[in-house]
Image (spheres, helix red, strand yellow):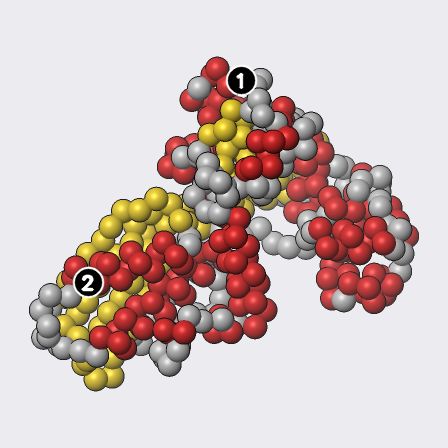
Amino acid sequence: MKNKSILHLDLDTFFVSVERKEHSELNNKPVIVGGMGDRGVVAACSYETRKFGVHSGMAMKVARQLCPQATVIKGNASTYTKYSKEVTEIIKSQVPSFEKASVDEFYADLSGMDKFFGINQFASELRQTIIKESGLPISFGLSQNKVVSKIATGEAKPNAEIVIPQGEEKIFLAPLSVNKIPMVGNKTFQKLLNLGVREIKTIQEMPVEMLESVLGKAGRTIWKRANGLDDTPIIPYHERKSISTERTFGRDTIDMVRLHATLVAMAESLAYQLRRGNKLTSVVSVKIRYSDYQTHSKQAKISYTSADHILIPKVEMLFKQLYSRRLLIRLIGVKFSGLVGGNYQINLFDDSEEMLNLYNSIDKIRDRFGEHSVMRAVTMGTKTIGRMGNPFNGEPPIVLAHRKQ
């Protein structure tokens, strides 16, 4: 197999860096970005706060107690999106193929570029270009696969770079803590610690079967990653601007209970798709086609979100405003647009810990048992609206040729 060169780029403490660029008085001071309410959650924190034990995802209340001198800022998703796009454009103009993993994280395939110039030098120059043009700090790891490169970036931070030469993956990984392996969360980390496994080196020395017997199928993946083996492909980047679903009724209807249930089911399904694809929406629209084929739609701008409890009431409200003709309805549709990549982090500006935990749990069940394993009571009995597959896997959307109009 030809040697691959996979670059992983990650903007350092991205939200904090953007705030500092906009407000230079925050430089070198402890800064926390996240939800301001009683139950808010930390979305990002500067390195200065970390020595006090602050980390992203913790309750804001706890973070303020640990580091009372920190400046706390409610994040601004549209500003962060603007900077994220700027960096995306720079990368797009320089590399043959790249993947945007989230609002602040990218992979690029530089394989074969050494025919023209040294890959290491190219990666360094790309990083300097991003720093110079965007004014934001960024780190990178470069190796022959995504996992090793991502771990290397973590080791390089803040604002630095690490190259792992071919064949040295295991040596680089050996001394690191096992929780540096992507997909080793707190629970798995505890299990490994209970086994006396603290460093990646220990996993490298274990037979794969042993890890599988403790961790199941995930054990094999973790063992491979610990040994620097990974063949996950780069998913080329396509900007997906919107996501929508519509339903044509077999028989035109005026049954409000059924219409309402269908709308809620659509909004719920699309919101789940957003969360699965690490996306947030800022524009909600509802469409109605009457039995005489006249079609009307209405949209509303909202703060970036992927949360059912914000999106469903918005959809209901738009439908109420729109449905004025008291005619039979042939089709209804819901669309979320103005999308940004921003995973849960940006949601942390508005949502409480309980809400995030609730969505996390529901989504985990759906990921495992299918989208219809958890449904709102009101949507029971609606024909299937969910979709298989992830609409944000970077593939351009499939056009549904057989759709009824």
Q: Label 1 neighbourhood size at 10 Å, few (<14), some (14-19), many (20+)? A: some
The image quarter in which residue 220 lies:
bottom right
Q: Label 2 neighbourhood size at 10 Å, few (<14), some (14-19), many (20+)? A: few
Vertical placement of residue 119 versus 203, above or below:
above
Q: Is 161 situated left or right of 88 in this image?
A: right
- Quarter of the C terminus within the rendering: bottom left
Q: Is 48 situated left or right of 343 in this image?
A: right
Q: Earlier in the sequence, mark 2 or mark 1?
A: 1
Q: Label 2, on which residue?
A: 320
**In the depicted view, which residue is nearer to us: 269 or 391?**
269
Q: Is 361 situated left or right of 319 in this image?
A: right
SS at mark 2 in the image = helix
Task: Point out which mark residue 27 bears.
Answer: 1
- The answer to whether any part of residue 396 appears in the image is no
The image quarter in which residue 399 lies:
bottom left
Residue 134 is situated, as x and y percent measured from the top left of the image, at 46, 25
The image quarter in which residue 187 lies:
bottom right
SS at mark 1 in the image = loop
Residue lying at 62% horizontally and 39% vertically, measured from the top left: 7
Residue 354 is situated, as x and y percent measured from the top left of the image, at 52, 52
Work out which residue is located at the far top of the displayed protein and give it.
25
Vertical placement of residue 45 versus 202, above or below:
above
Cα–Cα gap, marks 2 and 1? 48 Å
Residue lying at 50% horizontally and 28% vertically, measured from the top left: 72
Residue 259 is situated, as x and y percent measured from the top left of the image, at 25, 74
Vertical placement of residue 131 versus 227, above or below:
above
Q: Is 357 situated left or right of 3 in this image?
A: left
Residue 77 is situated, as x and y percent measured from the top left of the image, at 41, 38
Mark nearest the camera among 2 and 1 is: 2
**In the depicted view, which residue is nearer to us: 50 or 387?**
50
- The answer to whether any part of residue 57 appears in the image is yes
Q: Amino acid at mark 1?
A: Asn
